[in-house]
Image: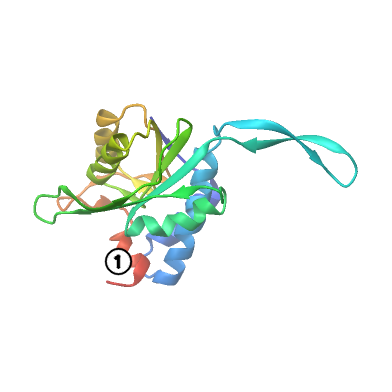
């Protein structure tokens, strides 16, 4: 299952992200902002419990998130989305996965992983700006499954039908949230129209 966030503010910011003339500082800022919008939708099913709070006038019933949220950015581009999520759920814990795509085989190669301990109510949010072939996302979900995590969602900025299909075949119960589902992958496995190389554009390494 995937959800495309078509909010006008998201689509406006996405248009600036797509522009090849947008420089890395603004690109990073917009990536954070779009992530916040996408996560607002992705996290609407978080579990809460009722609590009583003393306001300046009286006691009132409020709510507190009970899910243990774990954010796992895929290095390096996924780091750009971390602040956006932590601004919404500042108590979230953070794990890291290092995966890169082999330029010849286009297959994911894992080079780093570090996860906090999982609990029964841990919800893992896997983040990467681009869900292209789906290989890195599936490889990360495989690692999380081995670590004992049972619940996960994927949050990205841009994806495509090919990538969605790969993730859904491997993990049909993991929802995917994106600002845009683009047309296709090109012969080099880049999303079209896409954003270009998100990592390079984020960090000015073009």
Q: Position of residue 14 (x, y in %)?
A: 44, 55
Disc 1: CA contacts within 10 A as few (<14), some (14-19) or many (>=20): few
* Outermost residue, front side: 117
The residue carrying mark 1 is 200
Q: Where does the C terminus fall, quadrant-wise?
A: bottom left
Q: Measuring 41% from the left and 38% from the top, which residue is drawn there?
A: 118
On screen, 33 above or below 150? below
Vertical placement of residue 43 versus 10, above or below = above
Q: Quadrant of the N terminus?
A: top left
Residue 44 position, x and y percent, is: 56, 36
Q: Which one is nearer the viewer's eye here, 186 or 65? A: 65
Left/right of residue 91 with respect to residue 194 in the rendered view: right
Res. 48 visible in picture: yes
Residue at point 22%, 43% (across, down): 135
Colour pattern: rainbow
Pinpoint residue 56: horizontal percent, then vertical percent: 88, 47
Residue shown at the point (56%, 54%) measured from the top left: 87
Left or right: 148, with 45 as reference point: left
Choose top left, top right, bottom left or bottom right for residue 138. top left
Secondary structure of the residue carrying tag 1 is: helix
Look at the image and tell me whether residue 12 can be seen: no
Residue 127 image offset from top left, x and y in percent: 38, 48
| Residue ranking furthest to the left | 104
Q: Residue at x 47, y 51 (%)?
A: 35
Q: Nearer the viewer, residue 117 or 29?
A: 117
Position of 174 with respect to 189 (left or right) is right
């Amino acid at each position: 299952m995937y959800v495309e966030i078509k909010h006008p503010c998201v689509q406006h910011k996405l248009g600036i992200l797509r522009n090849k003339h947008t420089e890395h500082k603004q690109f990073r800022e917009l990536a954070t902002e779009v992530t916040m919008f996408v996560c607002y939708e992705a996290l609407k099913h978080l579990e809460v419990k009722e609590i009583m709070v003393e306001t300046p006038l009286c006691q009132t019933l409020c709510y507190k998130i009970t899910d243990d949220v774990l954010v796992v950015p895929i290095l390096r581009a996924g780091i750009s989305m971390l602040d956006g999520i932590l601004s919404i759920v500042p108590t979230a814990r953070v794990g890291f996965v290092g995966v890169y795509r082999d330029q010849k085989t286009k297959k994911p190669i894992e080079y780093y992983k570090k996860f906090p301990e999982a609990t029964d109510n841990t919800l893992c949010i896997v983040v990467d700006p681009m869900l292209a072939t789906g290989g890195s996302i599936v490889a990360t979900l495989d690692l999380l499954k081995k670590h004992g995590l049972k619940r996960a969602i994927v949050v990205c900025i841009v994806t495509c039908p090919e990538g969605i299909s790969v993730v859904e075949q491997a993990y049909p119960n993991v929802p995917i949230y994106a600002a845009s589902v683009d047309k296709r992958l090109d012969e080099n496995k880049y999303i079209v129209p896409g954003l270009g190389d998100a990592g390079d554009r984020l960090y000015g390494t073009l």
